[in-house]
Amino acid sequence: SPPPDADVIIIGGGTAGCVLAARLCAALPRVRVLLLERGAPRNATEELLVRSPRLVAGSWSTPSVAAAFPSAANAGLRGRPVALVTGATLGGSSAVNAAQWSEPADDGAGAAAWGVAHLTATVAARAYARAAATLGVRVPPRGLRHEYLTDWVAAAAAAGLPRVTDAGGGAPQSRRGVWLQRLAIDGRGRRVDAGRAYVAPAARGACARNLVVRQGVTVARVVLAPHHGRGGGRRGGLVGVVGVEVVPTASAGDGRPPRTTTLRARLGVITAAGPYGSAPLLLRSGIGRPQALRSAGVRPVVDLPVGEGLLARSVGRVVGAYDGVPLAAVNNATLLADPATLRRWRAGRGGPLGAALSVGLGRVTTGEGAYFPAGFASSVPGKPEYNSGCLANPTSRGRLSLPVGAAATDPLTPPRVETNLLGNRRDMATLLACMRKLQAVVEGFRPAFGMTETVPGADTRLTEELVRRTATSGAHLVGGCSVGRVLEATLRVKGVGNLWVVDASALPAMPRSAGPMASVYMLAEHASEAFIRQFRGQ
Ligand SMILES: Cc1cc2nc3c(=O)[nH]c(=O)nc-3n(C[C@H](O)[C@H](O)[C@H](O)COP(=O)(O)OP(=O)(O)OC[C@H]3O[C@@H](n4cnc5c(N)ncnc54)[C@H](O)[C@@H]3O)c2cc1C
Protein backbone atom coordinates (compact mmCIF):
# COMPACT_ATOMS: atom_id res chain seq x y z
CA SER A 1 0.00 0.00 0.00
CA PRO A 2 1.13 3.61 -0.53
CA PRO A 3 3.24 5.20 2.23
CA PRO A 4 1.30 6.93 5.01
CA ASP A 5 0.65 10.65 4.73
CA ALA A 6 1.15 11.06 8.47
CA ASP A 7 1.67 9.06 11.63
CA VAL A 8 -1.37 10.45 13.40
CA ILE A 9 -4.31 12.15 11.71
CA ILE A 10 -6.51 14.44 13.81
CA ILE A 11 -9.92 15.21 12.37
CA GLY A 12 -11.20 18.68 13.24
CA GLY A 13 -9.06 21.67 14.19
CA GLY A 14 -11.47 22.79 16.90
CA THR A 15 -11.19 23.20 20.65
CA ALA A 16 -9.97 19.68 21.37
CA GLY A 17 -8.27 19.06 18.00
CA CYS A 18 -5.93 22.04 18.37
CA VAL A 19 -4.88 20.95 21.88
CA LEU A 20 -4.17 17.40 20.70
CA ALA A 21 -2.24 18.47 17.61
CA ALA A 22 -0.06 20.94 19.48
CA ARG A 23 0.66 18.72 22.48
CA LEU A 24 1.43 15.62 20.41
CA CYS A 25 3.70 17.26 17.86
CA ALA A 26 5.64 19.11 20.55
CA ALA A 27 6.20 16.07 22.77
CA LEU A 28 6.85 13.61 19.93
CA PRO A 29 9.16 15.31 17.41
CA ARG A 30 9.43 12.13 15.32
CA VAL A 31 5.70 11.66 15.00
CA ARG A 32 4.19 13.41 11.99
CA VAL A 33 0.84 14.94 12.93
CA LEU A 34 -1.71 15.95 10.31
CA LEU A 35 -4.56 18.20 11.48
CA LEU A 36 -7.52 18.37 9.10
CA GLU A 37 -9.99 21.26 9.45
CA ARG A 38 -13.02 21.80 7.25
CA GLY A 39 -12.86 25.61 7.53
CA ALA A 40 -10.60 27.45 5.08
CA PRO A 41 -8.05 30.01 6.31
CA ARG A 42 -9.84 33.20 7.44
CA ASN A 43 -9.83 36.53 5.59
CA ALA A 44 -9.51 39.86 7.44
CA THR A 45 -13.27 40.30 7.97
CA GLU A 46 -13.69 36.80 9.35
CA GLU A 47 -10.68 37.34 11.59
CA LEU A 48 -12.26 40.48 13.04
CA LEU A 49 -15.51 38.64 13.81
CA VAL A 50 -13.64 35.86 15.53
CA ARG A 51 -11.27 38.00 17.55
CA SER A 52 -13.54 40.80 18.75
CA PRO A 53 -15.62 39.50 21.67
CA ARG A 54 -18.33 42.10 20.91
CA LEU A 55 -18.65 41.20 17.21
CA VAL A 56 -18.62 37.43 17.55
CA ALA A 57 -22.39 37.07 17.14
CA GLY A 58 -21.83 38.17 13.53
CA SER A 59 -19.81 35.00 12.96
CA TRP A 60 -22.86 32.82 13.66
CA SER A 61 -24.41 33.91 10.38
CA THR A 62 -21.12 33.71 8.46
CA PRO A 63 -21.01 30.19 6.95
CA SER A 64 -17.25 30.33 6.33
CA VAL A 65 -16.61 30.37 10.10
CA ALA A 66 -19.72 28.86 11.70
CA ALA A 67 -22.22 26.24 10.62
CA ALA A 68 -25.86 26.99 11.44
CA PHE A 69 -28.67 24.55 10.81
CA PRO A 70 -32.02 23.57 12.29
CA SER A 71 -32.52 20.75 14.76
CA ALA A 72 -35.26 18.17 14.32
CA ALA A 73 -38.65 18.99 15.84
CA ASN A 74 -38.69 19.09 19.68
CA ALA A 75 -41.80 17.55 21.23
CA GLY A 76 -41.12 19.57 24.41
CA LEU A 77 -41.23 22.77 22.35
CA ARG A 78 -44.57 21.97 20.73
CA GLY A 79 -42.81 20.51 17.71
CA ARG A 80 -40.57 23.50 17.04
CA PRO A 81 -37.04 22.97 15.71
CA VAL A 82 -34.32 25.23 17.16
CA ALA A 83 -31.35 26.85 15.44
CA LEU A 84 -28.03 25.12 16.13
CA VAL A 85 -24.66 26.84 15.69
CA THR A 86 -21.15 25.43 15.83
CA GLY A 87 -17.67 26.55 14.84
CA ALA A 88 -16.45 25.73 11.31
CA THR A 89 -13.04 27.35 11.32
CA LEU A 90 -9.63 26.72 12.88
CA GLY A 91 -10.24 26.90 16.64
CA GLY A 92 -13.73 25.43 16.13
CA SER A 93 -16.39 26.56 18.56
CA SER A 94 -13.71 28.14 20.77
CA ALA A 95 -13.36 30.71 17.96
CA VAL A 96 -17.04 31.65 17.80
CA ASN A 97 -18.38 31.07 21.30
CA ALA A 98 -19.02 33.45 24.18
CA ALA A 99 -15.47 32.73 25.46
CA GLN A 100 -16.68 32.03 29.00
CA TRP A 101 -14.26 29.83 30.87
CA SER A 102 -16.30 27.97 33.45
CA GLU A 103 -14.77 25.15 35.46
CA PRO A 104 -17.22 22.86 37.24
CA ALA A 105 -17.52 23.52 40.93
CA ASP A 106 -16.69 19.97 41.84
CA ASP A 107 -12.91 20.38 41.42
CA GLY A 108 -12.74 17.61 38.88
CA ALA A 109 -14.88 15.12 40.82
CA GLY A 110 -17.55 15.23 38.09
CA ALA A 111 -14.98 14.44 35.43
CA ALA A 112 -13.60 11.63 37.60
CA ALA A 113 -17.01 9.94 37.30
CA TRP A 114 -16.98 9.96 33.49
CA GLY A 115 -15.06 6.68 33.37
CA VAL A 116 -12.01 8.01 31.50
CA ALA A 117 -8.82 6.11 32.32
CA HIS A 118 -6.63 7.77 34.96
CA LEU A 119 -8.84 10.86 35.10
CA THR A 120 -9.03 11.39 38.83
CA ALA A 121 -10.24 14.63 40.40
CA THR A 122 -6.64 15.69 41.01
CA VAL A 123 -5.56 14.89 37.46
CA ALA A 124 -8.58 16.77 36.08
CA ALA A 125 -7.85 19.82 38.25
CA ARG A 126 -4.29 19.89 36.93
CA ALA A 127 -5.47 19.57 33.32
CA TYR A 128 -7.96 22.44 33.82
CA ALA A 129 -5.13 24.56 35.20
CA ARG A 130 -2.82 23.68 32.29
CA ALA A 131 -5.40 24.70 29.71
CA ALA A 132 -6.36 27.87 31.58
CA ALA A 133 -2.71 28.88 31.74
CA THR A 134 -2.12 28.15 28.04
CA LEU A 135 -5.11 30.27 27.06
CA GLY A 136 -4.37 32.92 29.67
CA VAL A 137 -8.02 33.02 30.80
CA ARG A 138 -8.79 35.96 33.03
CA VAL A 139 -11.48 38.10 34.54
CA PRO A 140 -11.50 41.02 32.09
CA PRO A 141 -9.31 43.82 33.38
CA ARG A 142 -11.18 46.92 34.57
CA GLY A 143 -11.00 48.74 31.24
CA LEU A 144 -12.80 45.85 29.52
CA ARG A 145 -15.62 45.41 32.00
CA HIS A 146 -19.12 46.69 31.37
CA GLU A 147 -19.98 50.03 32.92
CA TYR A 148 -23.11 48.52 34.49
CA LEU A 149 -21.39 45.52 36.02
CA THR A 150 -21.78 46.88 39.56
CA ASP A 151 -25.46 47.65 38.92
CA TRP A 152 -26.02 44.12 37.63
CA VAL A 153 -24.32 42.58 40.66
CA ALA A 154 -26.51 44.76 42.93
CA ALA A 155 -29.69 43.82 41.00
CA ALA A 156 -28.82 40.14 41.34
CA ALA A 157 -28.20 40.55 45.07
CA ALA A 158 -31.59 42.25 45.43
CA ALA A 159 -33.08 39.18 43.75
CA GLY A 160 -31.39 36.86 46.24
CA LEU A 161 -28.33 35.98 44.14
CA PRO A 162 -25.33 37.31 46.04
CA ARG A 163 -21.91 37.76 44.48
CA VAL A 164 -19.77 34.69 45.02
CA THR A 165 -16.05 34.59 44.55
CA ASP A 166 -12.97 32.55 45.27
CA ALA A 167 -9.34 33.30 45.74
CA GLY A 168 -8.44 32.55 42.11
CA GLY A 169 -10.82 35.17 40.77
CA GLY A 170 -13.09 32.44 39.42
CA ALA A 171 -16.21 31.26 41.14
CA PRO A 172 -17.32 28.41 43.36
CA GLN A 173 -20.03 27.48 40.90
CA SER A 174 -21.84 25.12 43.19
CA ARG A 175 -23.38 28.09 45.00
CA ARG A 176 -26.30 30.22 43.99
CA GLY A 177 -25.16 33.66 43.06
CA VAL A 178 -23.35 35.68 40.43
CA TRP A 179 -19.70 36.13 39.68
CA LEU A 180 -17.31 37.97 37.44
CA GLN A 181 -16.70 35.73 34.47
CA ARG A 182 -13.31 34.46 33.39
CA LEU A 183 -12.90 34.70 29.64
CA ALA A 184 -10.56 33.30 27.01
CA ILE A 185 -9.37 36.76 26.00
CA ASP A 186 -6.06 38.52 26.27
CA GLY A 187 -5.50 41.59 28.43
CA ARG A 188 -6.32 43.81 25.43
CA GLY A 189 -9.76 42.39 24.78
CA ARG A 190 -8.99 39.99 21.93
CA ARG A 191 -10.27 36.45 21.88
CA VAL A 192 -7.79 33.63 22.37
CA ASP A 193 -9.11 30.49 20.67
CA ALA A 194 -7.56 27.04 20.55
CA GLY A 195 -5.89 27.67 17.18
CA ARG A 196 -4.23 30.82 18.44
CA ALA A 197 -3.19 29.48 21.86
CA TYR A 198 -2.08 26.00 20.84
CA VAL A 199 -1.55 25.45 17.11
CA ALA A 200 -0.08 28.79 16.04
CA PRO A 201 2.85 28.78 18.49
CA ALA A 202 3.48 25.06 17.88
CA ALA A 203 3.54 25.48 14.09
CA ARG A 204 5.93 28.42 14.39
CA GLY A 205 8.19 26.76 16.94
CA ALA A 206 8.62 23.21 18.22
CA CYS A 207 6.48 21.60 15.51
CA ALA A 208 7.70 23.43 12.43
CA ARG A 209 8.82 20.07 10.98
CA ASN A 210 6.25 17.56 12.15
CA LEU A 211 2.88 19.35 12.19
CA VAL A 212 0.89 19.92 9.02
CA VAL A 213 -2.41 21.80 9.23
CA ARG A 214 -4.67 21.39 6.21
CA GLN A 215 -7.66 23.68 6.10
CA GLY A 216 -10.63 23.63 3.74
CA VAL A 217 -10.97 19.83 3.73
CA THR A 218 -13.88 17.91 5.17
CA VAL A 219 -13.36 14.34 6.28
CA ALA A 220 -16.06 12.19 4.72
CA ARG A 221 -15.28 8.99 6.62
CA VAL A 222 -12.54 6.96 8.22
CA VAL A 223 -11.30 3.99 6.21
CA LEU A 224 -11.55 0.73 8.16
CA ALA A 225 -9.58 -2.45 7.59
CA PRO A 226 -8.62 -5.55 9.62
CA HIS A 227 -6.53 -4.33 12.52
CA HIS A 228 -2.93 -5.44 12.99
CA GLY A 229 -1.19 -5.18 16.34
CA ARG A 230 2.23 -3.68 16.86
CA GLY A 231 4.02 -6.88 15.89
CA GLY A 232 2.03 -7.09 12.66
CA GLY A 233 -0.27 -9.86 13.89
CA ARG A 234 -3.99 -9.43 13.39
CA ARG A 235 -5.70 -8.54 16.70
CA GLY A 236 -8.66 -10.70 17.51
CA GLY A 237 -11.97 -9.35 16.26
CA LEU A 238 -10.82 -5.75 15.97
CA VAL A 239 -11.01 -3.62 12.90
CA GLY A 240 -8.55 -0.80 12.49
CA VAL A 241 -8.29 2.52 10.71
CA VAL A 242 -5.87 2.98 7.85
CA GLY A 243 -6.74 6.57 7.10
CA VAL A 244 -9.46 9.00 6.10
CA GLU A 245 -11.28 10.11 2.99
CA VAL A 246 -11.46 13.85 2.49
CA VAL A 247 -13.36 16.15 0.15
CA PRO A 248 -12.83 19.85 -0.49
CA THR A 249 -15.25 21.78 1.76
CA ALA A 250 -15.68 24.33 -1.04
CA SER A 251 -17.46 21.69 -3.15
CA ALA A 252 -20.58 22.08 -0.97
CA GLY A 253 -23.65 22.84 -3.05
CA ASP A 254 -22.00 22.76 -6.48
CA GLY A 255 -24.20 19.83 -7.50
CA ARG A 256 -21.35 17.53 -8.52
CA PRO A 257 -20.05 14.55 -6.54
CA PRO A 258 -17.05 15.90 -4.59
CA ARG A 259 -13.55 14.73 -5.48
CA THR A 260 -12.43 12.29 -2.79
CA THR A 261 -8.82 11.83 -1.65
CA THR A 262 -7.58 9.18 0.77
CA LEU A 263 -4.98 10.14 3.38
CA ARG A 264 -3.28 7.33 5.25
CA ALA A 265 -2.20 7.28 8.90
CA ARG A 266 0.52 4.99 10.24
CA LEU A 267 -0.46 4.92 13.92
CA GLY A 268 -4.07 5.96 14.03
CA VAL A 269 -6.79 8.56 13.73
CA ILE A 270 -8.24 10.79 16.43
CA THR A 271 -11.56 12.38 15.72
CA ALA A 272 -12.11 15.77 17.32
CA ALA A 273 -14.80 16.92 14.91
CA GLY A 274 -16.96 18.22 17.74
CA PRO A 275 -20.43 17.58 19.10
CA TYR A 276 -22.04 17.62 15.64
CA GLY A 277 -19.08 16.16 13.72
CA SER A 278 -17.65 13.04 15.33
CA ALA A 279 -20.82 10.94 15.58
CA PRO A 280 -21.83 11.46 11.91
CA LEU A 281 -18.29 10.64 10.89
CA LEU A 282 -18.40 7.30 12.69
CA LEU A 283 -21.85 6.59 11.25
CA ARG A 284 -20.72 7.30 7.67
CA SER A 285 -17.80 4.94 8.31
CA GLY A 286 -20.05 2.03 9.26
CA ILE A 287 -19.87 2.38 13.05
CA GLY A 288 -23.38 2.53 14.49
CA ARG A 289 -26.59 0.56 14.79
CA PRO A 290 -26.70 -1.82 11.77
CA GLN A 291 -30.33 -1.29 10.86
CA ALA A 292 -30.07 2.50 10.83
CA LEU A 293 -26.82 2.32 8.86
CA ARG A 294 -28.34 0.03 6.24
CA SER A 295 -31.31 2.29 5.74
CA ALA A 296 -28.88 5.19 5.22
CA GLY A 297 -27.02 3.14 2.59
CA VAL A 298 -23.94 2.49 4.75
CA ARG A 299 -22.44 -0.99 5.20
CA PRO A 300 -22.37 -1.74 8.95
CA VAL A 301 -18.97 -2.72 10.34
CA VAL A 302 -19.13 -2.18 14.10
CA ASP A 303 -22.37 -2.25 16.11
CA LEU A 304 -22.35 0.63 18.62
CA PRO A 305 -24.98 3.13 19.89
CA VAL A 306 -23.33 6.06 18.11
CA GLY A 307 -25.39 9.25 18.29
CA GLU A 308 -27.48 8.09 21.22
CA GLY A 309 -27.60 9.78 24.63
CA LEU A 310 -27.08 13.40 23.57
CA LEU A 311 -27.49 16.08 26.20
CA ALA A 312 -28.39 19.54 24.91
CA ARG A 313 -29.07 22.67 26.91
CA SER A 314 -32.15 24.75 26.41
CA VAL A 315 -32.15 28.47 26.99
CA GLY A 316 -34.98 30.74 28.11
CA ARG A 317 -34.49 34.47 27.63
CA VAL A 318 -35.47 37.30 29.94
CA VAL A 319 -34.92 40.79 28.55
CA GLY A 320 -35.35 44.29 29.92
CA ALA A 321 -35.25 47.77 28.40
CA TYR A 322 -33.86 50.75 30.30
CA ASP A 323 -34.22 54.50 29.81
CA GLY A 324 -32.86 56.07 33.00
CA VAL A 325 -29.13 55.74 32.29
CA PRO A 326 -27.06 56.21 29.11
CA LEU A 327 -26.94 53.46 26.49
CA ALA A 328 -24.20 50.96 27.40
CA ALA A 329 -21.09 51.59 25.27
CA VAL A 330 -21.00 47.93 24.27
CA ASN A 331 -24.35 48.40 22.47
CA ASN A 332 -23.91 51.93 21.23
CA ALA A 333 -24.36 51.65 17.44
CA THR A 334 -22.66 54.98 16.71
CA LEU A 335 -19.66 54.11 18.81
CA LEU A 336 -19.42 50.60 17.34
CA ALA A 337 -19.48 51.96 13.77
CA ASP A 338 -16.88 54.64 14.47
CA PRO A 339 -13.55 53.84 12.72
CA ALA A 340 -11.78 55.19 15.82
CA THR A 341 -13.32 52.33 17.83
CA LEU A 342 -11.78 49.80 15.46
CA ARG A 343 -8.41 51.59 15.50
CA ARG A 344 -8.48 51.66 19.28
CA TRP A 345 -9.22 47.94 19.52
CA ARG A 346 -6.63 47.05 16.87
CA ALA A 347 -4.03 49.03 18.80
CA GLY A 348 -4.82 46.87 21.81
CA ARG A 349 -6.46 49.64 23.79
CA GLY A 350 -9.79 47.87 24.38
CA GLY A 351 -13.01 49.78 23.92
CA PRO A 352 -16.43 48.32 23.10
CA LEU A 353 -15.05 45.87 20.52
CA GLY A 354 -12.99 44.28 23.28
CA ALA A 355 -15.91 43.88 25.68
CA ALA A 356 -17.68 40.54 25.88
CA LEU A 357 -21.32 40.03 24.96
CA SER A 358 -22.05 39.15 28.57
CA VAL A 359 -21.46 41.17 31.69
CA GLY A 360 -21.10 38.18 34.03
CA LEU A 361 -22.37 34.75 34.98
CA GLY A 362 -24.62 33.30 37.62
CA ARG A 363 -26.03 30.07 38.95
CA VAL A 364 -29.64 29.89 39.95
CA THR A 365 -30.79 26.51 41.11
CA THR A 366 -29.33 23.56 42.90
CA GLY A 367 -29.50 19.96 41.61
CA GLU A 368 -28.73 19.71 37.90
CA GLY A 369 -28.43 23.46 37.90
CA ALA A 370 -29.20 26.35 35.66
CA TYR A 371 -26.67 29.00 34.82
CA PHE A 372 -27.14 32.37 33.31
CA PRO A 373 -25.09 34.76 31.29
CA ALA A 374 -26.37 38.34 31.27
CA GLY A 375 -25.33 41.36 29.25
CA PHE A 376 -26.08 44.74 27.78
CA ALA A 377 -25.12 43.92 24.20
CA SER A 378 -28.27 43.15 22.28
CA SER A 379 -28.05 41.70 18.80
CA VAL A 380 -29.46 45.00 17.51
CA PRO A 381 -26.87 47.67 18.29
CA GLY A 382 -28.40 50.92 19.44
CA LYS A 383 -31.01 49.40 21.74
CA PRO A 384 -30.84 50.15 25.46
CA GLU A 385 -31.39 46.53 26.35
CA TYR A 386 -30.41 44.21 29.15
CA ASN A 387 -30.58 40.55 28.17
CA SER A 388 -30.17 37.40 30.17
CA GLY A 389 -30.78 33.74 29.51
CA CYS A 390 -31.12 30.60 31.57
CA LEU A 391 -28.96 27.68 30.48
CA ALA A 392 -30.58 24.66 32.07
CA ASN A 393 -28.66 21.45 32.59
CA PRO A 394 -30.70 18.76 30.85
CA THR A 395 -31.76 15.33 32.01
CA SER A 396 -33.74 14.42 28.87
CA ARG A 397 -31.56 12.87 26.21
CA GLY A 398 -31.60 13.36 22.46
CA ARG A 399 -30.12 11.61 19.46
CA LEU A 400 -27.99 12.37 16.46
CA SER A 401 -28.28 10.47 13.17
CA LEU A 402 -27.39 10.78 9.52
CA PRO A 403 -29.55 13.12 7.46
CA VAL A 404 -32.53 11.41 5.87
CA GLY A 405 -32.80 10.83 2.14
CA ALA A 406 -30.23 11.21 -0.58
CA ALA A 407 -27.93 13.36 1.59
CA ALA A 408 -27.50 10.58 4.18
CA THR A 409 -23.84 10.01 3.41
CA ASP A 410 -22.98 13.51 2.21
CA PRO A 411 -20.27 14.83 4.59
CA LEU A 412 -21.19 18.40 3.68
CA THR A 413 -24.80 18.09 4.88
CA PRO A 414 -25.41 18.63 8.61
CA PRO A 415 -26.66 15.68 10.64
CA ARG A 416 -30.17 15.25 11.96
CA VAL A 417 -30.07 16.34 15.61
CA GLU A 418 -32.91 15.50 17.95
CA THR A 419 -32.05 17.86 20.78
CA ASN A 420 -35.14 16.81 22.74
CA LEU A 421 -35.17 20.11 24.63
CA LEU A 422 -37.49 20.20 27.64
CA GLY A 423 -38.18 16.55 26.97
CA ASN A 424 -39.33 15.87 30.52
CA ARG A 425 -41.05 17.68 33.38
CA ARG A 426 -37.89 18.02 35.43
CA ASP A 427 -36.11 20.01 32.71
CA MET A 428 -39.18 22.19 32.29
CA ALA A 429 -39.28 22.91 36.01
CA THR A 430 -35.57 23.80 36.12
CA LEU A 431 -35.88 26.27 33.26
CA LEU A 432 -39.07 27.85 34.54
CA ALA A 433 -37.68 28.37 38.05
CA CYS A 434 -34.54 29.90 36.61
CA MET A 435 -36.44 32.29 34.35
CA ARG A 436 -38.56 33.45 37.28
CA LYS A 437 -35.35 34.28 39.12
CA LEU A 438 -34.07 36.24 36.14
CA GLN A 439 -37.29 38.24 36.12
CA ALA A 440 -36.52 39.13 39.74
CA VAL A 441 -33.05 40.32 38.66
CA VAL A 442 -34.64 42.63 36.08
CA GLU A 443 -36.85 44.01 38.85
CA GLY A 444 -33.82 44.32 41.13
CA PHE A 445 -32.11 47.11 39.16
CA ARG A 446 -32.09 50.40 41.09
CA PRO A 447 -35.06 52.58 40.15
CA ALA A 448 -32.88 55.20 38.43
CA PHE A 449 -32.13 52.59 35.74
CA GLY A 450 -35.70 52.72 34.49
CA MET A 451 -35.59 48.99 33.73
CA THR A 452 -38.76 47.29 32.47
CA GLU A 453 -39.11 43.66 31.48
CA THR A 454 -39.79 43.31 27.74
CA VAL A 455 -39.36 39.53 27.28
CA PRO A 456 -41.48 37.66 28.30
CA GLY A 457 -42.90 41.07 29.25
CA ALA A 458 -43.96 42.84 32.43
CA ASP A 459 -47.63 42.15 31.62
CA THR A 460 -47.13 38.60 30.38
CA ARG A 461 -47.51 35.66 32.71
CA LEU A 462 -44.53 33.30 32.51
CA THR A 463 -46.13 29.90 32.04
CA GLU A 464 -44.92 26.48 30.94
CA GLU A 465 -46.74 26.98 27.68
CA LEU A 466 -44.94 30.25 27.01
CA VAL A 467 -41.59 28.62 27.73
CA ARG A 468 -42.39 25.76 25.35
CA ARG A 469 -43.21 28.27 22.64
CA THR A 470 -40.09 30.43 23.12
CA ALA A 471 -37.13 28.39 24.49
CA THR A 472 -34.19 27.94 22.14
CA SER A 473 -30.88 26.06 22.08
CA GLY A 474 -28.14 27.04 24.50
CA ALA A 475 -25.40 25.92 22.05
CA HIS A 476 -24.05 23.45 24.61
CA LEU A 477 -24.26 19.86 23.44
CA VAL A 478 -22.39 16.79 24.67
CA GLY A 479 -22.56 13.02 24.17
CA GLY A 480 -23.18 11.06 21.01
CA CYS A 481 -19.89 9.14 21.23
CA SER A 482 -19.70 9.04 24.98
CA VAL A 483 -17.31 7.11 27.17
CA GLY A 484 -18.98 3.89 28.26
CA ARG A 485 -21.54 3.73 25.44
CA VAL A 486 -19.27 4.14 22.43
CA LEU A 487 -15.77 4.63 23.79
CA GLU A 488 -13.51 2.59 26.01
CA ALA A 489 -12.01 4.29 29.05
CA THR A 490 -9.03 5.12 26.84
CA LEU A 491 -11.36 7.09 24.52
CA ARG A 492 -10.78 4.45 21.82
CA VAL A 493 -13.86 3.49 19.82
CA LYS A 494 -14.99 0.08 21.06
CA GLY A 495 -14.02 -2.68 18.65
CA VAL A 496 -11.76 -0.46 16.55
CA GLY A 497 -8.04 -0.78 17.20
CA ASN A 498 -6.65 2.67 16.51
CA LEU A 499 -9.53 5.16 16.34
CA TRP A 500 -10.22 7.55 19.21
CA VAL A 501 -12.75 10.32 19.87
CA VAL A 502 -11.71 13.32 21.94
CA ASP A 503 -14.16 16.23 21.97
CA ALA A 504 -17.49 17.29 23.48
CA SER A 505 -19.20 14.23 22.03
CA ALA A 506 -17.10 11.99 24.31
CA LEU A 507 -18.53 13.60 27.48
CA PRO A 508 -21.12 11.30 29.07
CA ALA A 509 -22.55 14.08 31.28
CA MET A 510 -23.12 17.81 30.98
CA PRO A 511 -20.54 19.45 33.23
CA ARG A 512 -21.97 21.40 36.18
CA SER A 513 -20.60 24.68 34.99
CA ALA A 514 -21.83 27.53 32.84
CA GLY A 515 -20.47 25.89 29.68
CA PRO A 516 -18.59 22.79 28.49
CA MET A 517 -15.65 24.55 26.80
CA ALA A 518 -13.30 24.34 29.80
CA SER A 519 -14.15 20.65 30.23
CA VAL A 520 -13.39 19.93 26.56
CA TYR A 521 -10.00 21.61 26.90
CA MET A 522 -9.40 19.63 30.09
CA LEU A 523 -10.27 16.32 28.43
CA ALA A 524 -8.03 17.08 25.45
CA GLU A 525 -5.13 17.98 27.74
CA HIS A 526 -5.61 14.74 29.66
CA ALA A 527 -5.96 12.62 26.51
CA SER A 528 -2.84 14.20 25.01
CA GLU A 529 -0.76 12.89 27.88
CA ALA A 530 -2.07 9.38 27.34
CA PHE A 531 -1.40 9.54 23.58
CA ILE A 532 2.11 10.81 24.19
CA ARG A 533 2.82 7.83 26.43
CA GLN A 534 1.27 5.47 23.89
CA PHE A 535 2.94 6.80 20.73
CA ARG A 536 6.35 7.44 22.25
CA GLY A 537 8.83 5.09 20.58
CA GLN A 538 6.36 3.86 17.93
C1 LIG B 1 -22.24 30.04 19.84
C2 LIG B 1 -21.62 29.22 20.94
C3 LIG B 1 -21.38 29.81 22.18
C4 LIG B 1 -20.82 29.04 23.21
N1 LIG B 1 -20.40 29.66 24.34
C5 LIG B 1 -19.70 28.97 25.27
C6 LIG B 1 -19.10 29.62 26.38
O1 LIG B 1 -19.08 30.84 26.48
N2 LIG B 1 -18.50 28.84 27.34
C7 LIG B 1 -18.44 27.50 27.24
O2 LIG B 1 -17.93 26.86 28.16
N3 LIG B 1 -18.93 26.85 26.16
C8 LIG B 1 -19.51 27.56 25.16
N4 LIG B 1 -19.95 26.93 24.03
C9 LIG B 1 -19.70 25.48 23.89
C10 LIG B 1 -18.24 25.17 23.57
O3 LIG B 1 -17.71 26.13 22.69
C11 LIG B 1 -18.13 23.77 22.96
O4 LIG B 1 -18.71 22.83 23.85
C12 LIG B 1 -16.70 23.31 22.70
O5 LIG B 1 -15.94 24.36 22.14
C13 LIG B 1 -16.71 22.10 21.78
O6 LIG B 1 -15.39 21.73 21.48
P1 LIG B 1 -15.11 20.50 20.49
O7 LIG B 1 -13.65 20.36 20.37
O8 LIG B 1 -15.91 19.35 20.94
O9 LIG B 1 -15.75 20.95 19.09
P2 LIG B 1 -15.44 22.21 18.19
O10 LIG B 1 -14.65 23.22 18.92
O11 LIG B 1 -16.74 22.63 17.61
O12 LIG B 1 -14.50 21.65 17.06
C14 LIG B 1 -14.90 20.80 16.02
C15 LIG B 1 -14.05 21.13 14.82
O13 LIG B 1 -14.15 20.11 13.86
C16 LIG B 1 -14.33 20.66 12.58
N5 LIG B 1 -15.02 19.63 11.80
C17 LIG B 1 -16.27 19.13 12.02
N6 LIG B 1 -16.52 18.13 11.16
C18 LIG B 1 -15.42 17.99 10.39
C19 LIG B 1 -15.08 17.11 9.33
N7 LIG B 1 -15.92 16.16 8.90
N8 LIG B 1 -13.87 17.25 8.73
C20 LIG B 1 -12.99 18.21 9.16
N9 LIG B 1 -13.27 19.06 10.16
C21 LIG B 1 -14.46 18.95 10.78
C22 LIG B 1 -15.13 21.92 12.84
O14 LIG B 1 -15.03 22.83 11.77
C23 LIG B 1 -14.50 22.41 14.12
O15 LIG B 1 -13.36 23.21 13.89
C24 LIG B 1 -20.52 27.67 22.99
C25 LIG B 1 -20.78 27.09 21.74
C26 LIG B 1 -21.29 27.86 20.71
C27 LIG B 1 -21.51 27.22 19.37
Image: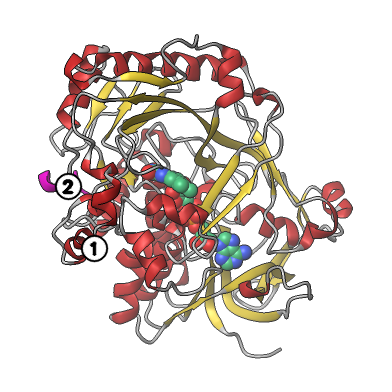
Q: How crowded is mark 2: few (under 14 residues within 10 Å), some or many (20 or more)?
A: many
How far apart are the alpha carbons under marks 1 and 2? 19 Å
Badge 2 element: helix
Which is nearer the eye, 329 or 528?
Answer: 329
Residue at the location (36% across, 30% down)? 387
Q: Which amino acid does label 2 sit on?
A: Leu
Q: Is mark 2 within 8 Å of ligand 1?
A: no
Q: What residue type is labelled 1?
A: Pro
Name the side, left or right, on which 269 lies relative to 211.
right
Q: Up-down: is 384 above or below 130?
A: above
Image quadrant in which you'd find residue 380:
top left
Residue highlighted by disc 1: 339
Residue 431 lies, in percent from the top left, at 49, 20
Q: Is residue 140 magenta?
A: yes
At horizontal 63% and vertical 80% (from top left) the residue drawn is 264
Which residue lies at the image location 45% right of the left edge and 13% below the top edge?
A: 433
Query: Which residue lies under the disc numbered 2?
Result: 144
- For label 1, the SS is helix
Which residues, given as a range, are shown in magenta?
A: 138-144
Of circles 1 and 2, the one toward us is 1
